[in-house]
Image (cartoon, helix red, strand yellow):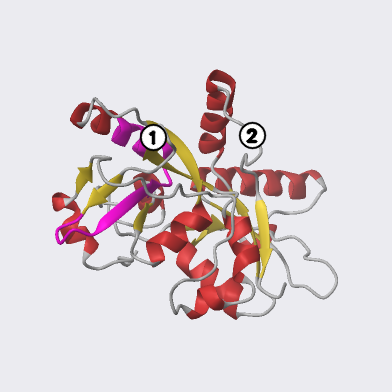
Amino acid sequence: LALAFASLAALVAGLRVTPSTRAPRPRLDASRSEEPTDGSKLFESPQWPALLSSLNRLPSFTVANERGQPLEYEAPGGTPLAMFYADVQAAQAELVDARKMYPELDCGVIPIGVGTAFRLASEGKALLIPSALELEAAGAPAGSSPVGQQLPLFGCLEISRDGGPGRGPILPLFMSRSDALAAVRDAADAIEGEGGAADDLDVMCLSLDRAVELLLTVEGTGFEFVPPSASLDFIDATIRSEGWGNSHAPSSASAAGDA
């Protein structure tokens, strides 16, 4: 996969966490829509607010302080960056490192909607870091750094569903390839159970950047975004153990480009 930010990979070694000594920054609220602040044509699209809402039902994870404010990292030159992880295990590993470096900070891992994370990353205010495992499943060389890479999504054209009158088919896109393969196996079993012959059902890869572009620019495009089962398990377990509210608990979310 091509680097989403070509210069960022070279800056990774210089990133350092910035202690919360500056004035508190506003909390990133994954449940709210934001008005575009840059000149991006994509974010100026009238379809963007609905797509943002759909994407925000997918979880990414960040290390945040007790106020729910993501820790910022400072790149060479002083640019502050929040770090959002598609892989909850990577976020938990980052939490361990942050606690070692700054034991006085009361930190934890919290979910942030992928839509908000994607928007901030597109504006150069954050990094949305895909899972290294999913990157390798998408074809990246083993051991590739996920920092600066585009987020891969996985789907199978043969398991698209009818989008309804006047709409094209809705294609499920999974953040996890293993979840996509499980859905494909279920579809194949259903076909064979009805006496049909299941053809080879291939799983394809599409970057989040490309999916957003298609939804906002190509009429009739429809995707259903499916969060990773591992992320949902983590959120459910944390709700039970720590009493998180579940008003924004992620679930699959559909979006159509001709809405």
Residue 93 among those drawn in magenta: yes
Checking the image for residue 89, the label placed there is 1
Mark 2 or 1: in front is: 2
Instruction: Give the extent of the magenta segment.
Output: 75-95
Quadrant that contains the N terminus:
bottom left
Question: Disc 2 designates what residue?
Answer: 246
The answer to whether residue 227 is left or right of residue 105 is right
Checking the image for residue 182, the label placed there is none
For the image, the number of numbered tags is: 2
The answer to whether residue 87 of the structure is visible from this angle is: yes
The numbered mark, 2 or 1, whose residue comes first in the sequence reads 1
Q: Residue at x 38, y 43 (%)?
A: 70
Residue 46 place in picture, x, y as percent: 63, 76
Q: Residue at x 71, y 44 (%)?
A: 189
Q: Residue at x 51, y 35 (%)?
A: 230
Residue 214 among those drawn in magenta: no
Q: Quadrant of residue 165?
A: bottom right
> Residue 76, relative to residue 247: is it above or below?
below
